[in-house]
Amino acid sequence: MWSSDPGLVSDEDDRLVRHLRFLESHVFQIHTKWPHYRCLLRDLQEISGQAAASATVACLERAFIFGGKSLFAALFPHVNFCPVDVLLEELPPDRIGYQLHWLEHPDCYASIVAQEAYVSELPFVDGEVDVLLVPNLVHHIRDQSALFAEIARVMKPGGRGFIFETLLRELHQVPFDFVRWTPWGFEEMLGTVGLRLTEWRPAGGPFEAIAYCWDQALQYLPQAERDVRSRWFRTEHFPELMRLEAQFGRCNLEREHTTFPVAYGIHFEKPVSGT
């Protein structure tokens, strides 16, 4: 297992470690902006480490943002990794390839081109996929029923799946932003297509939520005031909120049956018939 966390980095494959650091620092900015994406990267590492060499791993992505190349393929070098660039209806040309500059970073190893497809027509035969990944995508899909029906169709009985979704988000990529699921909503939807939720892993909490909202609010300020408040936020307030999150963010002391995750990972499986 490899990781870029201090003390856990392996020199076994420097290329993978460097790409993971690129995802952490540039794409998901987990140390300075969005710590909850650490959950996504750690879960993907875990799934990669557990996947058999013979496994077919499908990953549904928005690869059109990066010139059609998969950001996650480099994390799964030892399997049959099949990235799918999920097409959105009536996508304007200015939404395509707007993060191409990331591919020029020396630590980015996004070289595999994803196959284009709509969620209603995933490019796999029935029961072909051992592991199905949907990182940070579900909320951009208009037809949720078609998405989950296709996920169930292509997964092998006994296969496993992983979805990462944020619960706290601004409206973004407008108008291609359709839904926010709770874990129990996912459990209900997965059940309707014969899939079974096995675990959900929360990421972030109330103090991280405040930090997220501050980051968004700064973008609405005039540039001069934004510069001043950004320096305060990055150097003072953000570290303070992260300390409070680590110390107090897991337990609401006033209200039972209440949590405040910013995001979460959903792990699920396709049961073998009769189980």
Image: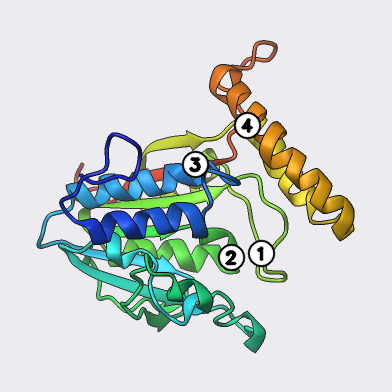
Whole-angstrom CA distance, mark 3 to mark 2, is 16 Å
**Sooner in the amino-acid sequence: mark 2 or mark 1:** 2
Q: What kind of residue is marked 3?
A: Tyr
* Residue of label 4: 239
**Sooner in the amino-acid sequence: mark 3 or mark 1:** 1
> Observer-nearest residue: 34 or 239?
239
Whole-angstrom CA distance, mark 2 to mark 4, is 31 Å
* Residue depth check, mark 3 versus mark 4: number of the one nearer the observer: 4
* Residue of label 2: 140
**Sooner in the amino-acid sequence: mark 2 or mark 4:** 2
Q: Position of residue 100 (x, y in %)?
A: 51, 78
The single residue placed furthest to the top in the displayed view is 253
Are the residues at dot 3 and dot 2 in contact (C-beta closer than 8 Å)?
Answer: no
* Residue of label 3: 264
Q: Residues within 10 Å of mark 4 (few under 14, many from 20)?
A: some
Are the residues at dot 2 and dot 1 in contact (C-beta closer than 8 Å)?
Answer: yes
**Sooner in the amino-acid sequence: mark 4 or mark 1:** 1
Residue 177: which numbered mark, if any?
A: 1
> Which quadrant of the view contains residue 107?
bottom left
Q: Position of residue 108 (x, y in %)?
A: 38, 67
Q: Residue at (85%, 56%) from the top-left corner?
A: 220
Number of numbered discs visible in the structure rendering: 4
> Observer-nearest residue: 94 or 9?
9
Query: Which secondary structure, mark 3?
Result: strand
